[in-house]
């Protein structure tokens, strides 16, 4: 694969001597491009790959120079997160840990509750729960490398791990609590059309009167499935308030 960074679309040119690495497992185009020593505030790239133009964008933050195709597929998103696992805790960790503690402090949940961390990533959201005394936690994510990072954390040694896509859940257990930190933050992962089926599938794995919690969500489950208990906005980092939601299965 021959790849050339042509230019940025953020008002700044990408220096010719900028070093970059990229995904080499995909045939059509890299699922991700990582650029070191990139000038600040570059969010979009134009690339030439095997004679064809492809556009890339920063996915989560302009401070993380890891680029994803603008019209990415779900498989490219998975590969992106496999790479992102290398730096995820340093860039995102404290935010997700704080969010999980906030949600669980908002609810009176038994320490023996069976908990599913949906879209668990590197497990950074479950670490504070273990420290709070929760003993039965399952972490689910579609990224092999993210779960590999989670398994290395001493706090999570007694947890269970499941590699699955949230869109195609097939579990053998039901849970007292299902929570997710930023997996429903936008249509980056899911589109609006697939949400009705997705909510039904998720709630199938929640016990009657089970608790469902979200942080950073643009979506909420329908009242026919989950009765909203409370919701609001939480200033998770200075200047940024994330939407949160807590509901109970009917």
Image (cartoon, rainbow, N blue to C red):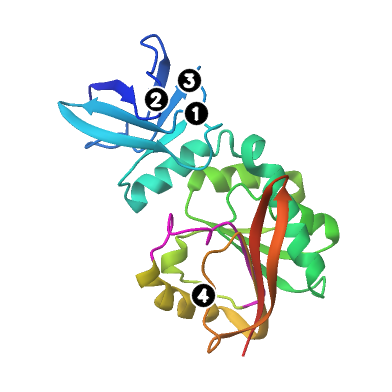
Q: Residue at x 72, y 54 (%)?
A: 235
Part of the protein shown in magenta: 175-191
Tell me: 95 left or right of 1.
Answer: right
Check contact, mark 1 vs mark 2: CB within 8 A.
Answer: yes
- Determine the CA span between mark 1 and mark 2: 9 Å
Which of marks 3 and 2 precedes in the sequence? 2
Numbered disc in front, either 3 or 4: 3
Image quadrant occupied by the C terminus: bottom right
Q: Is residue 188 visible?
A: yes
What percent of the width, then of the height, locates residue 117? 63, 62
* Percent coordinates x, y for residue 11 in the rendering: 39, 25
- The outermost residue toward the front is 11
Name the residue carrying label 2: 11
Circles 3, 4 touching at the beta carbon (< 8 Å): no
Can residue 152 be seen? no
* Residue 200 placement, left or right of 114: left
Label whose residue precedes the other's in the sequence (3 or 4): 3
Q: Name the secondary structure under disc 3.
A: loop
Q: Residue furthest left?
A: 51
């Amino acid at each position: 694969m021959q790849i050339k960074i042509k230019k940025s679309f953020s008002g700044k040119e990408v220096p010719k001597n900028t070093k970059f690495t990229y995904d080499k497992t995909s045939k059509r185009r890299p699922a991700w491009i990582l650029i070191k020593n990139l000038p600040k505030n570059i969010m979009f790239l134009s690339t030439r790959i095997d004679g064809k133009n492809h556009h890339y964008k920063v996915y989560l933050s302009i401070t993380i120079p890891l680029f994803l195709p603008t019209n990415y597929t779900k498989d490219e998103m998975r590969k992106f997160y496999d790479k992102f696992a290398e730096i995820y805790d340093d860039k995102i960790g404290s935010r997700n840990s704080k969010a999980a503690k906030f949600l669980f402090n908002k609810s009176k949940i038994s320490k023996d509750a069976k908990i599913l961390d949906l879209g668990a990533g590197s497990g950074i959201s479950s670490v504070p729960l273990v420290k709070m005394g929760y003993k039965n936690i399952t972490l689910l994510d579609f990224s092999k490398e993210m779960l590999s990072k989670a398994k290395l954390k001493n706090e999570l040694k007694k947890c269970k791990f499941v590699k699955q896509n949230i869109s195609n859940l097939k579990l053998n257990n039901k849970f007292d609590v299902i929570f997710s930190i930023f997996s429903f933050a936008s249509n980056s992962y899911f589109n609006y059309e697939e949400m009705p089926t997705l909510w039904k599938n998720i709630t199938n794995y929640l016990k009657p009167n089970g608790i469902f919690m979200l942080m950073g969500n643009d979506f909420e489950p329908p009242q026919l499935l989950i009765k909203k208990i409370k919701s609001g906005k939480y200033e998770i980092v200075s200047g940024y308030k994330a939407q949160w939601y807590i509901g109970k299965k009917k």
